[in-house]
Image: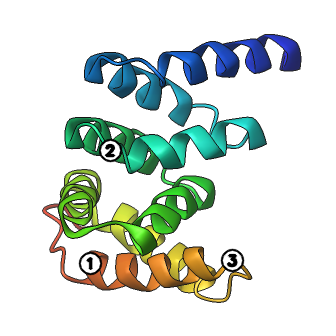
Amino acid sequence: MDRDRRHAAVLVLRELGRSHDYRDRADAGHGLAGFAEMQEALGPLLELVLDAGDTFVTRVTAEAVLRRKDRIGLAVVASALAVADSNHSDWIHTALHDVFSIFSEDRDNAMQLCEEMLRDTDDRVALGARQMHKALAEIDPVLRPI
């Protein structure tokens, strides 16, 4: 892994995330999702999930981060969900449904990660994980193992 190039990519995507154009911000959120494990990407990702200008940015960013299907991605979205207004919350729930409504194994793994995050020392993550766990439990995935 080339740490310097990854850092440079995050810096460019962070700058794109400050654009006045919602499409640029959505692209930045989508791109930054791939770097969510990097500390310098977390703040901008949270801002984009809670984008004040357009909930399209919220949906695209939340979905991209959730598609990581790992603890880091779920923690980013949980942290945002804990403080989201009802409009942003609706779009985050839409992203949850879009990502986890196909394979039951993916949904079940996400629920397990949420259970682990309930004990997180960050209160926002723990609160959001509780909300996400409840939303995931309401999803009935299309495909289940035989």
Q: Quadrant of residue 113?
A: bottom right
Write the residue at 78% across / 20% down: 7
Residue 55, quarter of picture: top left
Placement of the C terminus among the 4 image quadrants: bottom left
How far apart are the two marked residues, 3 and 2, measured between alpha carbons?
23 Å
The dot on residue 43 is none
Q: Position of residue 13 (x, y in %)?
A: 56, 19
Mark 1 or mark 2, which has the lower sequence index?
Answer: 2
Label 2 belongs to which residue?
Answer: 52
- Residue 44 lies, in percent from the top left, at 57, 38
Which of disc 1 and disc 3 is earlier in sequence? Answer: 3
- The residue under the point 39% across, 39% down is 64
Can you see residue 6? yes
Q: Secondary structure at mark 3?
A: loop
The quarter of the picture where residue 67 lies is top left
Mark 1: amino acid: Ala
Foreground of the two, 46 or 32: 46
* Distance in Å between CA atoms under marks 3 and 1: 20 Å
Specify whether 33 is left or right of 63. right
- For residue 122, the mark is 3
